[in-house]
Amino acid sequence: MPTIVSAKALDQLSPTTHTIQKNQIIAYFSPVTLGNEYSATPLTTGYYRVLLKKKAHGQYLVQDFYIKSKSKQSDPFWLSQTEDLHSFDPISVTGTLKLYYPTGELFFTTQYNQKQQLIGPSQLFNRKGQLLSKEVTYKDGTIQSDYWYSPNVPALKVKFNKDWHVLKAQGWDPHGQVIPENECFAEKSLEPQNQLDPCYLLMNLLNNRNQALAEEEQ
């Protein structure tokens, strides 16, 4: 059973220590449905985080697990900011980030550079390992997001810039019929005033589906 380390004890770790004792629990997090809130004390459901290693210059190798099954929720990943040790959505991740379903199948994968910038691609899979969504960030700052209803059944493809201005979009209904181009993000914004825009509704539907997958069997 991993030991529990308080935030105070963590801050007192020697900055010159290259590694520390493995398998020390440093945080608990509530389920997605309860906001992934941090807790210093054990919870009955959600996740817990184990500190595996601390480098001399302040990088932390951590890994998250499901509380109920004790199966891994992530592969080990690096954090470079101490405050992120108690955040379920850290902003200082470097390297590859892989997340898993409680039953062990790969759920999500992405990659960050040493400046914590997303270099992707970010990919989300169903339990059969089939791709359901993919997002690629290009050097010019534009982002391409692609969604599928099911493997090889396209739902939405949208390219936009950092200001959420839509550069190109194409959508399909569940029967494979193309949504007319002049109706798909017609205002050229990911947050249109017309919230009945069919591609805006479709993107929300697909993001909610992806969120529901993340909430399964916590």
Image (spheres, rainbow, N blue to C red):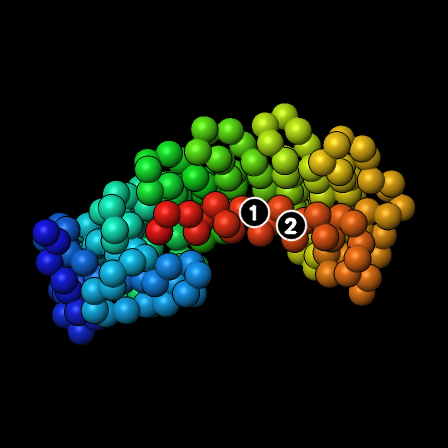
Q: Which image quadrant is residue 177 in?
A: top right
Most distant residue in the right direction? 182
- Alpha carbons under labels 1 and 2: distance apart: 6 Å
Q: Residues within 10 Å of mark 2 (few under 14, many from 20)?
A: few
For label 2, the residue is 205
**Looking at the picture, how far across and down is residue 158, in whole percent?**
72, 43
Q: Which mark is residue 209?
A: 1
Residue at the (51%, 51%) spot, across then down? 211
| Three-letter code for the amino acid on which mark 2 is drawn | Leu
Residue at the (45%, 41%) spot, across then down? 108
Q: Find numbered disc 2 in the image and state the secondary structure of the residue it sits on.
A: helix
Towards the viewer: 117 or 131: 131
Residue at the (50%, 50%) spot, across then down? 212
Most distant residue in the bottom direction? 8
**Looking at the picture, how far across and down is residue 100, in whole percent?**
37, 41
Q: Which mark is residue 89?
A: none
Question: Do tag 1 and tag 2 residues touch (Cβ < 8 Å)?
Answer: yes
**Looking at the picture, how far across and down is residue 60, in whole percent?**
26, 55
Q: Residues within 10 Å of mark 1 (few under 14, many from 20)?
A: some
Q: Is residue 179 visible?
A: yes
Residue at the (43%, 51%) spot, across then down? 215
**Looking at the picture, how far across and down is residue 127, in whole percent?**
44, 33
| Three-letter code for the amino acid on which mark 1 is drawn | Arg
